[in-house]
Image (cartoon, helix red, strand yellow):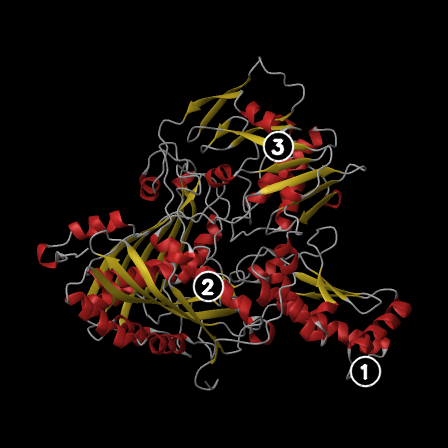
């Protein structure tokens, strides 16, 4: 496809080199945190509160047990501030008196024998005065007389454009819905863990499974009251994260370091069991959205009115920024003159919720896309045509007031998705199938959406990210940045960007271990920013390095790897220094008002249309995904195989969100299904065929026009699947996951004339 009409399509590419971390992981030589040698070390464990908030009255150590071999840490042992440094110092490191949720850390224990340590945990008793009126529901928090914090609100945002009253006057068809999404567990392969060592000079080294080393460093500085130059944070090989290792590793690092300090210098390894990890670490924020859409009879949107609320749990953590992204993405990729989105993050007695792939957008996009299908049904209009009528085009004004430029491919993704799925043909076939009285019903559903990459608005400017390239005398180049490889392929992509920019083979470039004593702060590994933002900095640093080699070491205009190595040798001999650094500068026109939600929210948006085909068994009401087509415009696929893997993985997580994954809470607000036998995620047998189509317009803010892609694929699967099920069964679905028992409830609520006919089965 020509770029003048639509972005180029690429389904397969040959320029996808082998992953640089692949061999170590395949052969088992990669060391995860629990594999790290810990000679003479101790193992750590945590004693936690049981009640849903309250007052800690006493800690009782069983006198029948000999505690002399244990290292014991409580709040009084914290030399600095008893709070995890993040957006606000509200989450305590160790409970001293009051607490807000079940599972808060009170006592840290360490011992050389893991089995003995496990027995000791059962010999520590906490006397807790129960919070008599815990809050676990979003609307209950908004209406409750008891306040955990003022108004039970962590954040309250308003995106308001146009005149809602005028939109209501012009609307001829209006729908109003309440839609809910649940908590979702990231379920990374490797549980959380940290190893802390006190060095001979008193400095502290913390190694572990993490996304954001400088977050951990800042938390240690505050908790330990030490200068940052005496603290070092190193990322070990990390077995998955998906946002779940953004903020919580700071808590575990503080705990491990406190134990190591009190242990007189012996290293301490603190590794969570899977059950503990599931019970206490942050998950995706549950949401409740009240949404009204109004259109004229032709289907043109006249107003969008949304009340979007998320459960932040017991502490603020990252909820305000999760809410901000959810609010910005809530109106979808649609042109509408009158928009109001109110977003609130509320305090409850659940454990704090946090970052998860998509960061608020999957929740609000789910509500918008399901509501669009409801509106199409009321208009007697095909859902695809309703979207086509309202999707943004170049020169339109989006919800935040930005004039959309040439980098707008909403229509292109829709057109390709309809073509690839033979949408209208499938629609007719499935309607005929359903009318014929088969023991299953089939449907095809879609979702159109966009996702902004990088920190919102001025966030990247505040980060002031830096990346350095260190060239060695023999011609190899080392990338120094704080961005982490956690399974997503960043180590390969960043090396590939540098190698291509320097015209070198990939084996001449390598990514330094993420170690805060060596690498500059290039920002956290979040928000789909690694390839786009950090990759761009690497490319700029490479350009600077080439200029330096040409000016100071006579690198010829045309060179090979040997010429490059020779120039590097000359540079080292002459200057003794071969380090170049690139600093972040925002794109032109990157202006954003955080108070009014007005301006350019993101440097680049990726655009997508996802199509789900499902089959529902009328007897068991189980849903089977027949096929899934994911079409997205992502600017430029630097490493197409990694990009496709990111999208396939995101679709898999999205299908779990839609159909299987539900966190069950007990009366104390603790996750009840806290093991892999009863927290159900889809396997490959449940996913159907996933077809990935990459469109490349080359207009993103990253290298060669690349955009961020990590979060995008999480946004579309759930609404596409729900819309397909609604079409198949002719019912309204108001929440996910769409479990068979929920479908039974919804089908039972249908008017008699719409009941699903009884079918006769032959066995």
Q: Position of residue 244 (x, y in %)?
A: 52, 48
Q: Quadrant of residue 618?
A: bottom left
Badge number at residue 648: 2
Q: Position of residue 706 (x, y in %)?
A: 55, 72
Q: Residues within 10 Å of mark 1 (few under 14, many from 20)?
A: some
Circle 1 residue:
556
Image quadrant where one finds the N terminus: bottom left
Looking at the image, tell me whether mark 1 or mark 2 is earlier in sequence order.
Answer: 1
Looking at the image, residue 247 sits to the left or right of residue 494; the answer is: left
Q: Quadrant of residue 376?
A: bottom left
Image quadrant where one finds the C terminus: bottom left
Looking at the image, tell me whether mark 3 or mark 2 is earlier in sequence order.
Answer: 3
In depth, the one of 288 and 734 nearer the eye is 734
The Cα atoms of the two marked residues, 3 and 2, are separated by 37 Å
The Cα atoms of the two marked residues, 1 and 3, are separated by 57 Å
Q: Position of residue 61 (x, y in %)?
A: 56, 18
Looking at the image, residue 604 sits to the left or right of residue 250; the answer is: left
């Amino acid at each position: 496809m020509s770029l003048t009409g639509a972005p180029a399509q690429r389904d397969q590419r040959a320029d996808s080199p082998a992953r640089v971390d692949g061999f170590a992981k395949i052969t088992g030589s990669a060391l995860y945190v629990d594999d790290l040698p810990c000679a003479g070390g101790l193992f750590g464990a945590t004693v936690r509160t049981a009640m849903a908030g309250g007052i800690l009255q006493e800690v009782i150590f069983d006198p029948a047990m000999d505690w002399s071999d244990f290292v014991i840490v409580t709040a009084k042992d914290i030399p600095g501030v008893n709070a995890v440094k993040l957006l606000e110092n509200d989450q305590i490191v160790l409970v001293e008196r009051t607490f807000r949720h079940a599972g808060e850390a009170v006592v840290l224990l360490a011992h050389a024998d893991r089995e003995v340590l496990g027995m000791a945990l059962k010999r520590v008793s906490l006397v807790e005065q129960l919070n008599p009126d815990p809050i676990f529901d979003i609307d209950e928090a908004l209406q409750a007389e008891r306040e955990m914090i003022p108004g039970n609100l962590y954040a309250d945002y308003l995106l308001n454009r146009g005149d809602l009253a005028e939109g209501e006057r012009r609307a001829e068809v209006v729908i109003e819905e309440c839609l809910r999404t649940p908590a979702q567990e990231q379920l990374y392969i490797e549980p959380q863990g940290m190893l802390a060592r006190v060095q001979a000079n008193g400095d502290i080294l913390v190694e572990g499974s993490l996304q954001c080393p400088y977050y951990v460093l800042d938390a240690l500085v505050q908790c330990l009251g030490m200068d940052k130059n005496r603290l070092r944070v190193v990322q070990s090989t990390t077995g998955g994260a998906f946002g779940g290792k953004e903020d919580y590793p700071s808590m575990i690092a503080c705990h491990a370091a406190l134990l190591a300090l009190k242990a007189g210098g012996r290293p301490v390894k603190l590794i969570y069991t899977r059950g503990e990890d599931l019970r206490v670490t942050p998950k995706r924020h549950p949401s409740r959205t009240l949404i009204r859409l109004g259109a004229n009879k032709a289907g043109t949107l006249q107003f969008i009115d949304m009340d979007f609320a998320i459960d932040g749990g017991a502490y603020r953590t990252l909820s305000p920024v999760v809410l901000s992204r959810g609010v910005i993405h809530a109106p979808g990729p649609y042109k509408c003159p009158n928009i109001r989105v109110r977003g609130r993050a509320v305090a409850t007695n659940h454990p704090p919720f946090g970052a998860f792939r998509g960061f608020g957008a999957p929740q609000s996009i789910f509500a918008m896309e399901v509501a669009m299908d409801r509106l199409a049904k009321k208009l007697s209009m095909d859902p695809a045509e309703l979207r086509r009528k309202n999707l943004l085009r170049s020169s339109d004004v989006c919800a935040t007031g930005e004039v959309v430029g040439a980098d707008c491919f909403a229509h292109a993704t829709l057109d390709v998705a309809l073509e690839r799925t033979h949408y209208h043909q499938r629609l007719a076939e499935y309607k005929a199938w359903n009318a014929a009285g088969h023991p299953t019903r089939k449907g095809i559903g879609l979702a159109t959406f966009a996702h902004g990459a990088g920190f919102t608005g001025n966030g990247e400017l505040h980060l002031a990210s830096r990346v350095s390239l260190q060239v060695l005398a023999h011609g190899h180049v080392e990338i120094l940045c704080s961005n982490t490889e956690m399974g997503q392929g960043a180590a390969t992509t960043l090396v590939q960007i540098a190698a291509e920019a320097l015209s070198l083979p990939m084996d001449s470039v390598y990514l330094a271990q993420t170690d805060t004593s060596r690498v500059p702060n290039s920002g956290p590994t979040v928000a789909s920013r690694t390839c786009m933002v950090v990759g761009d900095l690497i490319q700029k640093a490479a350009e600077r390095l080439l200029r330096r080699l040409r000016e100071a070491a006579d690198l010829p205009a045309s060179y090979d790897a040997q010429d490059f190595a020779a120039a590097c040798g000359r540079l080292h001999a002459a200057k003794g220094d071969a380090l170049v650094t690139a600093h972040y500068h925002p794109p032109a026109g990157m202006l954003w008002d955080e108070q009014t939600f007005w301006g350019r929210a993101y440097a680049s948006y990726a655009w997508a249309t996802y199509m789900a085909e499902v089959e529902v068994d009328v007897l068991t009401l189980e849903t089977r995904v027949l096929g899934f087509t994911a079409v997205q415009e992502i600017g430029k696929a630097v490493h197409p195989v990694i990009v496709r893997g990111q999208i396939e993985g995101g679709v898999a997580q999205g299908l779990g969100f839609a159909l299987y994954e539900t966190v069950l809470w007990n009366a104390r607000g603790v996750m009840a299904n806290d093991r892999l036998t009863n927290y159900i995620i889809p396997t490959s047998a449940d996913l159907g065929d996933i077809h990935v189509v990459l469109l490349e317009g080359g207009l993103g803010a990253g290298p060669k026009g690349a955009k961020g892609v990590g979060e995008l694929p999480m946004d579309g699967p759930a609404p596409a699947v729900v819309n397909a099920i609604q079409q198949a069964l002719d019912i309204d679905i108001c929440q996910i996951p769409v479990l068979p028992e929920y479908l039974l409830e919804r089908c039972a609520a249908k008017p008699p004339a719409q009941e699903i006919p009884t079918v006769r089965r032959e066995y």
